[in-house]
C-alpha cells in the first residue's frame, strides 16, 4: 500500500479562481518538513527550481523582508528572477513577491502553503496574485504549465533521494 | 501675470479613481525638463524626496529593469524604500514599483507622468496601483498626504533654485 502511494506520479492542478490569480495544487510524496527544506534550503532549491537547468542562487534570505534572486542558465538563455519575502512561517506558509527580469516591474505575490496529508504526503498550494488580469493571462500563455511540470518532476526526484 | 503664476502655492489633489489605486495630481512651477531632472538625477532626488530629512540613495538605475533603493533618516527613525523601473520615457513617463521595508512584499506600481502646461509649469500625475484595496487604504491612512505635501514643498524649493 505505502509503496504504491509513494511511487504514484502526481499531476499539478492549475486553476484561476479569480480574475487576477492562478492557483496551482500539487501533491508530493514526502513529509511537510522534507518539502519545506526543499523549498527553503538554497542548496536544495538549486536542484529543482530551474527545471533541471543550472540555477545560480545569488541571494536567498528566507525571512520576512529578505530578498531572493535566482538566475537560470537554460538552453534558451539566461533568465533572472527575484523578489522579497513577506512572510515565512515554517513549515506551513511562505509569502513572497515574484518578478522575472524579462518583464521588470511586473510583480506577483506568491502564497505557498504546505498541508500534511499523512502517509508521507504533502499538498503544496501556490496562489499567485497579479496586479492585472492581463499580467495573469500573460503568465499562463508563457508556457507556465510545462515549466511547472518540469520543476515538479525535478522536485520529485530530489525528494526521493532526500533523507 | 507670469510672476503671480510662479509664486502661487500649489496643492496636491489626491483621489481614488478605482478600488485599488491612488491618484495624486500636482502642478510645479518649472518646465517638464527641469522637473524630469529633479525626479531622475540622484543628487537632486536626495534634496526633496525625503521631505527635508537626510536621504541616502543606495541605488538608482533609471532605466527599464534598473533598481532603486532610498533610505530616509528622519526624526522617527530610519526607513528604507525600494523598487524597480518598468518604463523610463524621458521627459514624459516613468513606471516603477514601490515597496516600504516596514511592509515587505507589499508592492505597488507607480506611474508618473509629466505634462507641459506652458508658462513654465508642469503637471505631475502619480498613479499608484495596489494588489488589494486594503493595501491602498493602509497607505492612505499612514499619513501619506502630509508626507507628500512635505516632499512637494521641498521639491518646490529645489525647482526654484535649479537653473
Image (cartoon, coloured by chain):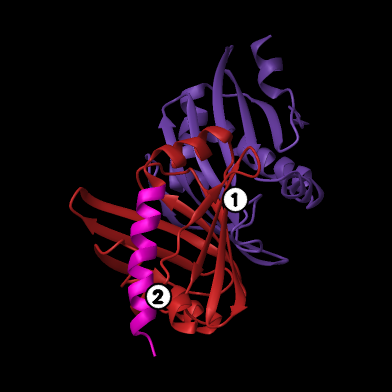
Chain colours: A purple, B red
Residue holding disc 2? B7
Q: Which mark is in front, 2 or 1?
A: 2
Which segment is the magenta one?
A: B145-163
Residue A41 seen by the camera:
yes
Residue holding disc 1? A107
Could you tell me which residue is drawn at 42 percent across and 58 percent down?
A: B82
**B158 inside magenta stretch:** yes
Mark 2, residues whose alpha carbon is within 10 Å: few (<14), some, or many (≥20)?
A: few
- Relative vertical location of residue B23 with respect to residue B156 in this rendering, above or below: above
- Relative vertical location of residue A114 with respect to residue A161 in this rendering, above or below: above
In the image, A158: left or right of B44? right
Number of numbered markers: 2
Task: Find the residue positioned furthest to the bottom.
Answer: B163
Residue at disc 2, secondary structure: helix
Could you tell me which residue is drawn at 48 percent across and 80 percent down?
A: B30
In the image, A1: left or right of A46? right
Disc number for residue A116: none
**Which of the two residues, A162 or B132, is positioned nearer the viewer here?**
B132
Amino acid at each position: 500500500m505505502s509503496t504504491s502511494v509513494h511511487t504514484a506520479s502526481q499531476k499539478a492542478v492549475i486553476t484561476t479562481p479569480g480574475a487576477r490569480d492562478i492557483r496551482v495544487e500539487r501533491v508530493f510524496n514526502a513529509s511537510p518538513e522534507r518539502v519545506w527544506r526543499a523549498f527553503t534550503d538554497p542548496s536544495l532549491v538549486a536542484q529543482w527550481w530551474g527545471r533541471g537547468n543550472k540555477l545560480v542562487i545569488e541571494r536567498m534570505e528566507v525571512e520576512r523582508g529578505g530578498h531572493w534572486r535566482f538566475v537560470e542558465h537554460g538552453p534558451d538563455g539566461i533568465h533572472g528572477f527575484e523578489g522579497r519575502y513577506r512572510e515565512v512561517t515554517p513549515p506551513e506558509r511562505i509569502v513572497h513577491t515574484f518578478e522575472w527580469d524579462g518583464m521588470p516591474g511586473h510583480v506577483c505575490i506568491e502564497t505557498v502553503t504546505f498541508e500534511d496529508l499523512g502517509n508521507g504526503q504533502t499538498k503544496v498550494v501556490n496562489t499567485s496574485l497579479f496586479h492585472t488580469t492581463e499580467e495573469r493571462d500573460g503568465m499562463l500563455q508563457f508556457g507556465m504549465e510545462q515549466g511547472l511540470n518540469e520543476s515538479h518532476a525535478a522536485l520529485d526526484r530530489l525528494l526521493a533521494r532526500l533523507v
